[in-house]
Amino acid sequence: MHDQPVAQAIRGATATGRRLAGRWTRAPRVLDALTAGSCLALMSLDIPGLAEADNALNGPLAALVLTCGAASLLVRRGAPWVTYAVALVLIGWLHELTLAQFALYSLGRYRGRLAGTFGVIGYVAFAYVMFTLPGWPVHRGDTLGSFLGLVVPIGVLAAGVGVAANRQDLVRALQAQRAETAALHAVQQERSRIARDVHDFVGRELTLLSVRSQVLARRAATGGDFEDGFEELSETARSAHRMLNEIIVRRGVDGAPTPGLDALPGLAERSERAGTPVDLLIDGAAYRLSPIRQAAVHRVVQECLTNAAKHAPGERVDVRVRVAGGCLRVSVRNALPGAGPSSSPVSAGTGTAGMAERVHTMGGTFSAGPCGGLYAVLATLPAGDLA
């Protein structure tokens, strides 16, 4: 009985460690430090040979020189040519080729194919000059064939891998830009639709409101009877308000209004039939919200259930709609899947942007993302006047 809490604690600690490790390894500075440490570890294998060679270096001094050389990798993103120059210095002084591999990779990764090509040419030419001078170590190639068989593959392979990584970076940046553009396009479409309807329909009512107010002003100036006119004015204002509500609530090309809270049990039932169980809890006071706010809640919950079915199939979804302290709070949570789906779900990636836009236009706040092993969506809106 006591093993279950311990196992849960171990799983929680493991998940936390994985998240922290993933976050740290994605940090550029951490990656650069790990790269510099790896390079130093490889170069340290040459310290005994450096201390024995005729280069006036003892063991500690050789270690210090190599450490300074590896430290140049900390600036490889912003100044890869600095790392490249340090690598050439180590080739000419200590005949050390390890740092050159990291330097050529950095040139290809952060400066592209042209820089990588020039880097390889310069590296091979400089190493060849060093080979022709006295003192080139035998284990680095005692004949021209063995020298080229060692130096050329090192440079070409390192730069080639760097160029390939550079292209992958460009592809990821392009994909992120496309996703952002699609989200902005979805938001702009929503705004344009609302603005067009407001201009076409509500604008007419407001024009009538202006005309009738001018008629009332003339009647008041001439001492005429204008009591009925005020009632017409009030009815026109109410009509404009109702039409504005209808425009904001209406969704889709067919003009059908977005359902309110009464439709949420049906959404939950359809999700359960599709394999995603749903726990739904709605405060009684929420049913007294205005149609606009009920439509916003329906939109958020509908999109969350769709995302859960795509990205966490089979995981239970907890939906809570509460009204307290003049605020409407909608929270939707589901467990993160233990493993990704066998195939990527078909998704335009604009649903979250649409939810956020609807909530923000009503003066609310919106957040969505992983939280403690769950994926949580939280929307908070002013409750307004309850019916």
Image (cartoon, rainbow, N blue to C red):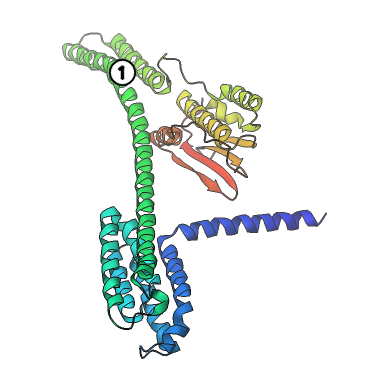
Q: Is residue 78 left or right of residue 63?
A: left
Q: Is residue 74 visible?
A: no
Residue 146 x/y as whole percent:
39, 69
Q: Quadrant of the N terminus?
A: bottom right
Mark count: 1
> Residue 313 occupies which quadrant of the picture?
top right
Is 128 rendered above or below residue 264? below
311 and 267: which is toward the camera: 311
Residue kind at label 1, given as amino acid type: Val
- The local secondary structure at tag 1 comes to helix
Q: Is residue 292 left or right of residue 68?
A: right
Of residues 269 and 287, the one nearer the viewer is 269
Residue 174 against residue 87 in the figure, above or below: above
Image side of residue 134 versus residue 22, left or right: left
Asked whether residue 151 appears in the rendered view, the answer is: yes
Left or right relative to 121: residue 165: right
Point out residue 244 in the picture as x, y percentages from the top left corner.
Answer: 36, 21
Residue drawn at x 41%, y 18% as measured from the top left? 246
Residue 89 location (% of width, % of height) = 30, 77
Residue at 34 percent across and 36 percent down: it is 181
The front one of 172 and 95 is 95
Q: Position of residue 102 (x, y in %)?
A: 38, 66
| Residue bearing mark 1 | 202
For label 1, the crowd category at 10 Å Cα-Cα, with few meaning under 14, some 14 to 19 and many 20 or more, is many
137 vs 191, nearest the viewer: 137
